[in-house]
Image (tube, rainbow, N blue to C red):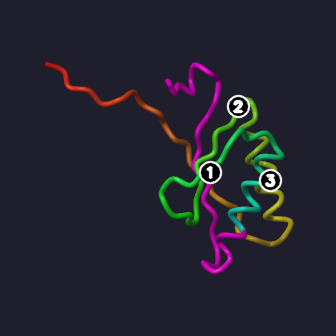
Amino acid sequence: MPFDPAASQERLVLLAVRGDPGERAAELARAVACARRAGALSAWPPGRRPGRSVLVLLPAARLTAVRAAVAEEFRGRGRPVPRFLNIAVAGAARREE
């Protein structure tokens, strides 16, 4: 199945929580729930084991709203605001001869 966020007007971002390692799993779950309520389509861990970050797929038009909602929720609790890092999706690697 082709994955082309630009063509479908979707964005892929990495959402990373900060703070106490013992609280990261709960904070990450909270950030994902907030992002989903604000319009994110999906979220999943970038590797085999859950950690301090998730990949989030969202409509490009909802990027600002999702970031703002997550930041507001964390600031309101006096917690460090999670980082949102843009992911550039490139085509598959290929050999040219």
The amino acid type found where label 3 is placed reads Cys
Rendered residue at 26%/26% (across/down): 94
The mark lying in front, picked from 1 and 3, is: 3
Residue 48: x and y, percent? Answer: 48, 59
| Residue pointed to by mark 3 | 34
Q: CA distance from mark 2 to mark 1?
A: 15 Å
The answer to whether residue 47 is above or below residue 76 is above
Q: CA distance from mark 3 to mark 2?
A: 15 Å
The answer to whether residue 41 is above or below residue 25 is above
Q: Secondary structure at mark 1?
A: strand
Q: Secondary structure at mark 3?
A: helix
The answer to whether residue 11 is above or below residue 14 is above
Rendered residue at 76%/62% (across/down): 30
- Who comes first in sequence, dot 2 or dot 1? 2
Please name whichever residue, 70 or 2, is drawn nearer the observer in this view of the structure.
2
In the rendered image, the quadrant that contains the C terminus is top left
| Residue pointed to by mark 1 | 84
Please name whichever residue, 73 or 2, is drawn nearer the observer in this view of the structure.
2
Task: State the residue lying farthest toward the right.
Answer: 76
Residue 41: x and y, percent? Answer: 71, 38
Q: Which residues are magenta?
A: 1-26
Crowding near the residue tagged with mark 1, few <14, some 14–19, many ≥20 C-alpha atoms within 10 Å? many
Is 5 one of the magenta-colored residues?
Answer: yes
The amino acid type found where label 1 is placed reads Phe
| Residue pointed to by mark 2 | 59
